[in-house]
């Protein structure tokens, strides 16, 4: 597997990051994960615009150039034999460091960044999840993201631990909640509930990572004539929903058919979810279609 690290392409086994890198020591870093469709990144500008805002907020000097980042992902897809298939891609930026200043307490902008990227095949079960749906577990409140939930930082231990516990229970995703029992999001996704013609997702103000795909799904649902709401909901709302689904840049839209061992709706992906899946795929195809040429 070939990866990109600080301007060079190399085998993953040869890639090295300093022991004093801020990402390794403190989770001081940001990342973006997106999907490549036959080697072409979807919504790259949107992902990098969010990353740029967060880099500025955290005092990083480096800024992503969409053309350069797109070229890196294309090169990685080619070197890893993924140009003809869909794949998962990740760009990570972390704070450098040194033995003399491991905290680090030096001005953040004076520290070099570590910039890495890689592409891998899609999860082997993803197509089945999209077609048949998944089971989820609702976790306890300590598994919520923490003090900066709106940022895609490298501090992902709570959702990673939640996902591990969920998998032990035979679930493909963990649903995180706040201290008042309000649903927030999945460990690796955003959450949507369907009651009749109303599509609801938890509001970002509760403390969650409002993903790029979440915003697109909200627009697609509105365009489909559905009532769309960002409002607080709890476990009971999930268990009594007609349908429920997850969204994410790599997973697109994945139906939820069971939660905490109980059937959601009919136990099969519902019509609203199916329609939004189709609309999402059409949106991707339209976005990546070649521009018409003048004759």
Image: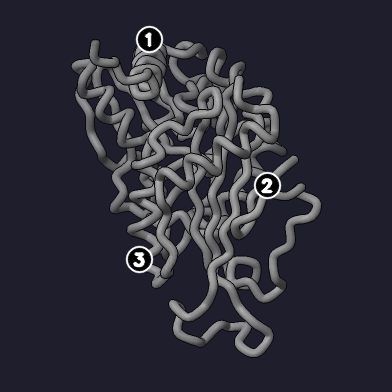
Q: Residue at x 62, y 33 (%)?
A: 77
Q: Can residue 272 be seen here?
A: yes
Left or right: residue 55 versus residue 126 is left
Percent of width and height locating residue 80: 70, 33
Looking at the rendered structure, the secondary structure element under dot 1 is helix
Looking at the image, is mark 1 or mark 3 earlier in the sequence? 3
Q: Residues within 10 Å of mark 3 (few under 14, many from 20)?
A: few
Q: How crowded is mark 2: few (under 14 residues within 10 Å), some or many (20 or more)?
A: many
Outermost residue to the front: 295
Q: Name the residue under label 1.
A: 271
Query: Which is more foreground, mark 1 or mark 3?
Result: 3
Query: Which is more foreground, mark 1 or mark 2?
Result: 2
The residue closer to the viewer here, 58 or 274, is 58
Percent of width and height locating residue 199: 29, 26
Query: Which is more foreground, mark 2 or mark 3?
Result: 2
Looking at the rendered structure, the secondary structure element under dot 3 is helix
Instruction: Say which quarter of the image contains residue 57.
Output: bottom left
Cα separation, mark 1 vs mark 2, equals: 40 Å
Instruction: Say which quarter of the image contains residue 119.
Output: top right
Cα separation, mark 1 vs mark 3, equals: 42 Å
Percent of width and height locating residue 66: 40, 45
Quadrant that contains the C terminus: top left
Depicted 138 relative to depicted 240: above or below: below
Q: How crowded is mark 1: few (under 14 residues within 10 Å), some or many (20 or more)?
A: few
Q: Which residue is drawn at 23% across and 33% down?
A: 229
Depicted 110 relative to depicted 243: above or below: below
User: Which of the numbered marks, if any, corresponds to residue 250?
Assistant: none
Q: Are marks 2 and 3 in contact (CB under 8 Å)?
A: no
Quadrant that contains the N terminus: top right
Q: Name the residue under label 3.
A: 56
Percent of width and height locating residue 173: 57, 35
Q: Name the residue under label 2.
A: 3
């Amino acid at each position: 597997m070939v990866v990109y690290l600080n301007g060079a392409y190399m085998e993953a086994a040869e890639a090295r990051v300093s022991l004093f890198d801020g990402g390794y020591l403190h989770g001081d870093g940001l990342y973006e994960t997106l999907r490549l469709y036959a080697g072409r990144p979807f919504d790259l500008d949107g992902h990098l615009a969010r990353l740029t805002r967060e880099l500025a907020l955290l005092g990083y000097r480096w800024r992503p150039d969409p053309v350069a980042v797109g070229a890196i992902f294309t090169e990685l897809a080619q070197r890893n034999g993924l140009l003809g298939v869909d794949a998962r891609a990740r760009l990570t930026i972390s704070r450098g460091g040194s033995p003399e200043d491991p905290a680090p307490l030096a001005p953040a902008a004076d520290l070099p960044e570590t910039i890495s990227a890689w592409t891998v095949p899609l999860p082997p079960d993803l197509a089945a999840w999209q077609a048949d749906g998944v089971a989820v577990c609702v976790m306890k409140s300590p598994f919520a993201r923490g003090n900066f939930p709106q940022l895609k930082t490298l501090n992902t231990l709570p959702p990673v631990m939640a996902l591990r516990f969920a998998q032990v229970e035979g679930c493909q995703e963990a649903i995180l909640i706040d201290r008042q029992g309000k649903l927030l999001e999945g460990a690796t996704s955003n959450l949507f509930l369907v009651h009749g013609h109303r599509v609801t997702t938890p509001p970002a103000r509760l403390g969650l990572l409002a993903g790029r795909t979440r915003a697109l799904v909200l627009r697609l649902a509105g365009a489909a004539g559905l009532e769309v709401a960002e409002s607080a909901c709890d476990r009971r709302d999930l268990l009594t929903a007609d349908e429920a689904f997850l969204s994410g840049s790599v997973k697109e839209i994945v139906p939820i058919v069971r939660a905490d061992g109980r059937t959601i709706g009919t136990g099969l992906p519902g019509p609203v979810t199916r329609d939004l899946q189709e609309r999402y795929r059409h949106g991707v195809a339209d976005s990546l279609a070649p521009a018409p040429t003048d004759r």
